[in-house]
Image (cartoon, grey):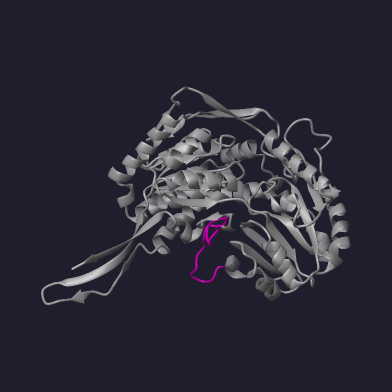
Amino acid sequence: MGAAWNYKLFIDGKWVDGEKGARIEVIDPATEETIGSVAEATTKDAVAAIQAARKAFDDGPWPWMKPSDRAAALVRMAEYLEARSTELRELIVAETGSVGPITDFIQAGGSIALLRSNANLIQSKVQWLEMGAPTAGSVSVGGSAVIREPIGVVAAITPFNFPFMLNLIKVAPALAAGCTVVLKPHPWTPLDAFMIAQAAEAAGIPAGVLNVITGHGEVGDELTSNPMVDMVTFTGSTATGKRILASASNTVKRVQLELGGKSAQVLLDDVGEDYARSVGFGAVLNHCGQGCVLTTRLLLPEHLLPAYKEGVMSAVKQIKIGDTRDPSTTLGPLIREQQRTRVEGYVASGNEQGAELLVGGQRPAHMNKGFFYEPTVFIGRNDMKIAQEEIFGPVLTVIPYSGKDEDAVRLANDSIYGLGGAVQAATTGRAFNVARRIRAGSMTAAGVAAPASANAGPGDGQGPGWGSYPAGVGQSGAFGGYKQSGLGREWGSMGIEEFTEVKSLAWQ
């Protein structure tokens, strides 16, 4: 085993043991070895963290600071994390089992830029004050303003799949808006959250503004029901999101939910056979399919099915499963044995319902450690369990269809979810028009027969005077879902505005 990481709870600017002195051990999903531990919080610890955040919001300077001062603190946090980027990457690989470019672009270093982008946005894009025209009387002047204010104490609850990115997607905009935060990471992947706490401490952010605790369901229940909490932001399963919504309803909290998905990648009928061969396993190779917005359904025109099958059988030979620290590895492990068992249950259901198992469907025979599973492709129908429910594993369900646009839209929308999706056609225009009709919050459209674009030229795509902007997922745009994929939006200026209240103030 390499490095070991061990942390206490971070409450009110202090590192403290949990009430009962219990610890949560963290294991590497690729090796099953213990890589560290964190103090386990109780509901009493959760209340202490909430009280600290409440006091820091009500009595402290943070919500009253100028946006530029809060921005400077976020930049200092980024600088601290950038200085420790090598250790951060090592931790995240060990904690999550992440492999390949996704580790740097999303899981680790690429997400640090969320602190810098939110620092930029609160100064340049968020409209904190909108003044109305004054009305003058004989002895006084009246007027009105619309003011944005931080919502208050935020409870942030995050999942295991992209923990560092999702922790920052919640913490950075909430802090930028002037809120105080109690962050509870998933007990399987809590370590990187405490590195964020260290960054806040090093940046001089006042005590109680950011608190990081761990724990299980009872701690989450305290965060979502406690009347001192003004808002809950959660990423995770739709089932858990429904429970959080119910728990928060008694105190009518603001709730932001980023939930499950069963997103469809749609190929239209003018896509060529060569492109169909190139699709392979699609997005389910990304982090072993453990992503809510990954396209885990492939809607494929029937005439392209033979070419697609050829491509998959060729692609499977290129898959390398194994060492998460080897740059040539293409598929890492699932996070825990429970998740692998869950995936196996869905594969069994696909077989039972008559889907054609094209490739995969089992544990790698040569792996005796780690929670690995072969990338799996089924040919099936949209009404099957494997096409309707979120599997959260490396399983792609291919659904042949007529090739007509109306059938593609109908099948893509035939889901309780509406998180993401993609459309590919010969031209971007046709793909765009079909993507507009799919009820999902995050769509991409691509013309795959278009010629390759020219070199970006001077500035690598930046115009004179534009300057550079932090790159990576979540820096701009708006992310969230329709239907049972969630409530609210994350990323960009909208992500900050979610953590604000709007006040109308008139005077005379």
Q: Is residue 244 magenta?
A: no
Q: Most prominent secondary structure in the magenta stretch?
A: loop
Q: Nearer the viewer, residue 156 or 217?
A: 217
Counting from the top left corner in percent of width and height, residue 461 is at: 59, 68
Q: Which part of the image, by quadrant, shows the N terminus?
A: top right
Q: Is residue 442 above or below residue 151?
A: below
Give the residues in magenta.
Answer: 462-480
Residue at 81% in and 38% down: 364
Counting from the top left corner in percent of width and height, residue 328 is at: 75, 45
Q: Is residue 464 magenta?
A: yes
Quadrant of residue 408 within the rendered picture: bottom right
From the viewer's perspective, is 183 left or right of 69?
A: right
Residue 51 in view, yes or no: yes
Residue 82 in view, yes or no: no
Q: Is residue 157 above or below residue 483?
A: above
From the viewer's perspective, is 243 left or right of 404?
A: left
Identify the residue at the far top of this view. Answer: 21
Identify the residue at the far left of this view. Answer: 139
Q: Nearer the viewer, residue 99 or 218?
A: 218
Q: Nearer the viewer, residue 92 or 242?
A: 242
Residue at 69% in and 62% down: 412
Counting from the top left corner in percent of width and height, residue 178 is at: 37, 51
Callout count: 0
Residue at 52% in and 62% down: 468
Counting from the top left corner in percent of width and height, residue 64 is at: 30, 51
Q: Which part of the image, by quadrant, shows the C terminus?
A: bottom left
Quadrant of residue 283 within the rendered picture: bottom right
From the viewer's perspective, is 12 left or right of 362?
A: left
From the viewer's perspective, is 46 left or right of 348?
A: left
